[in-house]
Image (cartoon, rainbow, N blue to C red):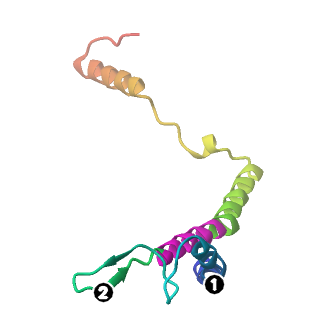
Amino acid sequence: VAVVIGGAFTAIVNSIVSSIINPLVALFYRADAMGQFGPTIEGIYGQDVTFPLGDLISAVISFFAVAVVVYFVFVYPMNHIKALAAARAGLTEAAQEPKLPTEQEILIQIRDLLEKQSGTPPRA
């Protein structure tokens, strides 16, 4: 579901970026006849080569806009719902994860097992 809605939302974001954001950026940077803006250098055969930074900026803005919407519409609410369901069930994060023994406890167990194997009385 998130992929389909994210894909549909991408078209909306791309439209907003190309019709609103790009013209605003073009106000500050000189755009060529095709609406591209960025640094222009002379190629090895004498032609002008423009690096289309406008396309890069558009793609970055589109990506972050879609990522923010997908996170706040899908991920954040689902995590909140899971937390509420766990709280209703009486489970906490500490109860869900088993407590692992510490390094010192494991070393004490190994010492006791070795002493038991060798037949010496265990230490306190």
Residue 39 in percent (x, y) is at: 41, 73
Residue 15, label in figure = 1
Was residue 60 drawn as part of the magenta stretch in this picture?
yes
Quarter of the image where one finds residue 110: top left
Residue 55 in percent (x, y) is at: 49, 78
Q: Residue at x 67, y 44 (%)?
A: 92
Residue 100 in percent (x, y) is at: 47, 36
Quarter of the image where one finds residue 95: top right
Q: Residue at x 75, y 54 (%)?
A: 84
Q: Nearer the viewer, residue 122 or 9?
A: 9
Which residue in the rendered view is the most extreme toward the right?
Answer: 88
Distance in Å between CA atoms under marks 1 and 2: 31 Å
Q: Amino acid at mark 2?
A: Gln
Label 1 environment density (alpha carbons within 10 Å; few <14, some 14–19, many ≥20): few
Residue 8 in percent (x, y) is at: 63, 85
Dominant secondary structure, magenta: helix
Residue bearing mark 2:
47
Q: Residue at x 53, y 41 (%)?
A: 98
Q: Quadrant of the C terminus?
A: top left
Which residue in the rendered view is the most extreme toward the bottom?
Answer: 34
- CB atoms of marks 1 and 2 within 8 Å: no
Q: Nearer the viewer, mark 1 or mark 2?
A: 2
In the image, residue 41 sits, relative to residue 121, either above or below, namely below
Asked which secondary structure carries label 2, the reply is loop
Span highlighted in magenta in the image: 54-69
Q: Quadrant of the N terminus?
A: bottom right
Was residue 67 drawn as part of the magenta stretch in this picture?
yes
Whichever of labels 1 and 2 marks the residue nearer the N terminus, that label is 1
Q: Residue at x 66, y 79 (%)?
A: 20
Q: Nearer the viewer, residue 98 or 19?
A: 19
Left or right for 119, reference 61 = left
